[in-house]
Image (tube, helix red, strand yellow):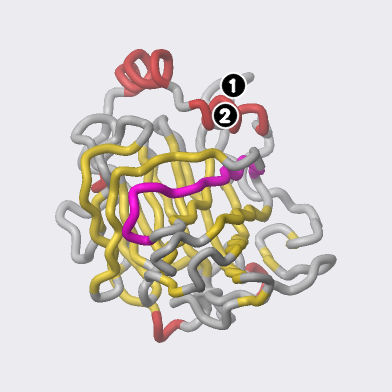
Amino acid sequence: MRPRMWIHLVIGLVVLVGLVSFSGVADAAGHLPPVPIQPPRDPLPIPNSGVLNPTSIYNDLIVPALPAPSMEADKFELSGQPGILKKVTNLANGTTLNYMNAPRPKACVDFNMGSRWEGDLFTNYYMGWGPFAVDDGGFYRAKNVVFSRESVVGPGRHYGSGYSLKISSTQPYAAGYGSPVISVKPGAQVTVKVRYLIYNHGNIAANNQWAYDWASLGVKPDAYGDMAIYVNGYVRGEWAEMVNTVTAGQSGQIMVLLQAHSPAALNSNIYFDDVEIWVDGEPLDRCY
């Protein structure tokens, strides 16, 4: 995980009926602001209705404009080891997020209650955690992104006992889930933790993987302000953790952003689970 990056987002995030709405002009990467994703969707994201020419993606996006985080992510490539690694870590055993050698999180949302999920097969969301995606009319098209209630990666061997969030596409995308507006004390120290897993897609050639997709965790110190503070996650093929600490703004309202990014036509699947929010050293019981 890289040190924190400051990214100024000229977007406003407002929670309305459990979904996120956005306004503004562009973010720091030059994208138009993300748009809220609400079911039902037409066209459906699978099969992709906006498949891009791979040569155009390479010549017009990868070569001249590969995002800096993608260059960092590529340092974590696991060539020849597609999928999810069958290994035991402190956090997990393969797909199963079980905290074998780590303290169990004091999660304010774990996405496990089936009755709190809404949406449809391609656009699931959990209570006030609403999906969004960049749609610039060019390479990044919101209609190609799937937002899923995941029942295997996360629960793993305990299939049927809970869920995680999944964001996926085989086309370039930038998408995420935004939390509800969360009230905290102005000036409080807020630490957000989330577990994430980047599926290790296969190689595009014998010795070239293009490990360009990555995860990020953003926190808006003022939910209705123009700035978010980010950390990025690049670990591939296994559950890992991102941690982001900010000082709450004077509004006393913050927002958390769980985001997935891919600048190429890759089999990108990124999962999130077990969000913790600590305010001045005390965990929130609920953030949905």
Q: Is residue 235 magenta?
A: yes
Q: Residue 86: percent from the left, percent from the top?
A: 74, 53
Left or right of residue 54, residue 152 in this image: right
The residue positioned 58% from the left and 69% from the top of the image is 277
Q: Quadrant of the N terminus?
A: top right
The residue positioned 61% from the left and 46% from the top of the image is 83
Q: Is residue 113 visible?
A: yes
* Image height of 220 relative to 28, above or below: below
The residue positioned 24% from the left and 42% from the top of the image is 135
Give the amino acid at mark 1: Asn
Say which residue label 1 marks. Answer: 208
Q: Quadrant of the C terminus?
A: bottom left
Asked whether the residues under the numbered discs 1 and 2 touch, taking CB atoms below 8 Å apart as contact, a structural biologist would say: yes
The residue positioned 32% from the left and 76% from the top of the image is 118
Q: Residue 208: percent from the left, percent from the top?
A: 59, 21
| Lower position in the chain sequence, tag 1 or tag 2 | 2
The stretch of residues the image draws in magenta is 223-236
State which quadrant residue 124 falls in: bottom left
State which quadrant residue 82 falls in: top right
Count of numbered circles on the image = 2
Kind of element beneath mark 2: loop
Most extreme residue toward the right is 101
Give the amino acid at mark 2: Asn
Say which residue label 2 marks. Answer: 203
Most extreme residue toward the left is 42
Kind of element beneath mark 1: loop
